[in-house]
Image (tube, rainbow, N blue to C red):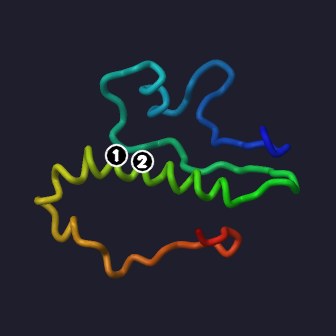
Amino acid sequence: MKYSGKINFPHVHNKTKIVDPLLQAVYHNEKQGPWIGSIPNRFFAELGPDYHPDQTVKAVKKAWFRIANTIWNNVVEPAADLGNGTQEPSCSAKPIRSPSIPRM
């Protein structure tokens, strides 16, 4: 790791096999797997004093944007006409911002 730290990922496998059903489907290249995601979307990082969080914030936002666009294009948009205001921006949506993460 570049900044002298370590990342602890969620438990998805043990010493002998993958225990998460979604990861099993991906790893074994199965045509069908679970429809609902089962891999936790979190991790725990321990970082050294020379670490600059702004680079990670940008990278995570870019990755989540790519994921969200893929889901929109492949799942939501094809069925959006069947929804009730699916394509309209939500007026009640408020951005979530942690005080420890600098605004970009």
Comparing 60 with 90, the one in front is: 60
Q: State if disc 2 and disc 1 touch (CB < 8 Å).
A: yes
| Vertical placement of residue 45 versus 13, above or below | below
**Point 11% across, 59% down: residue:** 82
Q: Residue at x 44, y 54 (%)?
A: 65
Identified at 63% across, 42% down, the residue is 10
Q: Position of residue 48 (x, y in %)?
A: 86, 52
Q: Which residue is pictured at 64% across the width and 18% down the height?
A: 16
Above or below, 89 against 68 in this view is: below
- Say which element carries label 2: helix
Q: Which residue is mark 2?
A: 67
- Using the image, tell me which numbered label, if any, was put on residue 70: 1
- Asked if residue 44 lies left or right of residue 5, the reply is left
86 left or right, relative to 14: left
Please tell me how crowded label 2 is: few (under 14), some (14-19), or many (20+) other residues with Cα within 10 Å.
Answer: few
Using the numbered discs, state the Cα–Cα distance from disc 1 to disc 2 in whole angstroms. Answer: 5 Å
Image coords of residue 56 (percent x, y): 65, 53
Name the foreground residue: 20 vs 53: 53
**Front in this rendered view, residue 24 or 59:** 59
Q: Residue 91: give x, y in percent of width and height.
A: 32, 81
Quarter of the image that includes the N terminus: top right
